[in-house]
Image (cartoon, rainbow, N blue to C red):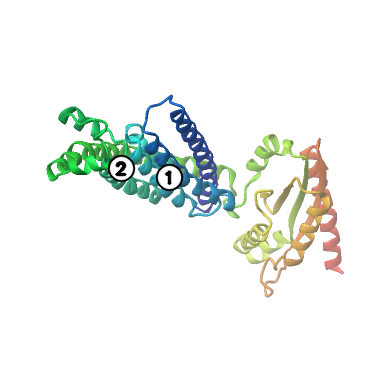
Amino acid sequence: MEEIEKLQYQDELKANKFSTVFLAVMCGISLLVCSANEIGIFVVNRFYMRLGIIIGCICLLIPMLIFFYTKGRNRWFKYVLIVCVSFMAISIQTFLTFHGVMLCVLPVLLAAQYIDTRVFRIAFSINLVGVFIAVLLGYYIGCWDGNMVYATTYGITLAEDSFAGRAAIMNAEYMKQLLLYFALPRMVIFSVISISISYILKNAKLQYVRQNMIRIQAECDGLTRLENRTKYNQRVSQEYKKLDSIYIVFLDVNFLKKMNDTCGHEAGDSVLKRVADEMRRLIDDTVHGYRLGGDEFALVFCNYSEEEARNMIKEWEKDVEPLNRKEDPVHCSLAIGGAYGCRPFDMETLLKEADENMYERKKAMKAHRQE
């Protein structure tokens, strides 16, 4: 499951980036709409429009600034995002209800990108309450569609449709009508849409886990949990040919066969796992680690200079822990060889060169040990 969690985190980073771009687009569209209203293209009350857009844009700017400051890598960014977008939706619904009533669905749709179900529950809870609050507040301080119903029923004029006018006609019966005919239907519709999205999301998650488990099993070595030769070949054919430079390190375990024969394959497997654990200290987005088969391993440094890669390997070798216990009758060690190439390079030739360099060192290590 460690590989699944890693993939989920990578997908979360992509979702954070997409959401931030989407928020920037939303801010731009909001400002364009407000500008169009200012010059008379639309006829929405300018005070309400300015207030709703300003508060909404402030809510959108907060997660955008946090994203640029943290690169979107913080686990809590998605919660800040959903809360801020929810308050933006509530603000627009309150001040510009005519056009903003369906914005309550937006936070739920953004939350659907994330595997973490808590994000969805937060979005649903805040916006369900938000629909209720927006109906009540919108009546007093917004360009609210419910006032049009009252105007057609009781003949209220635009001059009377003010804060004081609305407060004057407010009573328990009218409050009941607001909740019954406006708040409740919108909350029900919002709940139905959100619950439908949650079921779609649940099925998508199951499908996501199944597909990635199949892919991981095909690309991951079962013993060491490193990527295998299949993944290496895939990157050679697709990703590595686009690199400007590459440094390949070939690693081989000395005396592994003797360890298997003397102490059993369980002891030999333990050595292989130890090698993988040591390699993980180097592995990241730009350094890939593989078990190519048996006791053969490889590290690929992407777009490093030869000096940088060699120095990293040299420092890493100094800190490599013993591969097995001191009391074991056989002491295993690593033989390492590298090869560097700049574009255009041939991966097969570089791997062969790294293998030959490793083999020369392996012979030297064995000869030194025999002495």
Residue sitting farthest toward the bottom: 327
Q: Secondary structure at mark 1?
A: helix
Q: Is residue 169 left or right of residue 75?
A: left
- Location of mark 1 (residue): 55
Q: Mark 1 belongs to which amino acid?
A: Ile
Image spot of residue 113 (x, y percent): 45, 41
Q: Mark 2 belongs to which amino acid?
A: Ile
Q: Nearer the viewer, residue 240 or 106?
A: 106
Q: Quadrant of the C terminus?
A: bottom right
Tag 1: Cα neighbours inside 10 Å, few (<14), some, or many (≥20)? Answer: some
Q: Secondary structure at mark 2?
A: helix
Q: Nearer the viewer, residue 116 or 84?
A: 84
Report the residue at 75% width, 45% height from top.
303
Q: Is residue 169 visible?
A: yes
Does residue 317 lie above or below 193 as drawn? below
- Location of mark 2 (residue): 141
Image spot of residue 49 (x, y percent): 40, 36
Would you identify the image quadrant in which residue 171 lies? top left
Image spot of residue 21 (x, y percent): 54, 39
Q: Is residue 287 left or right of residue 6?
A: right
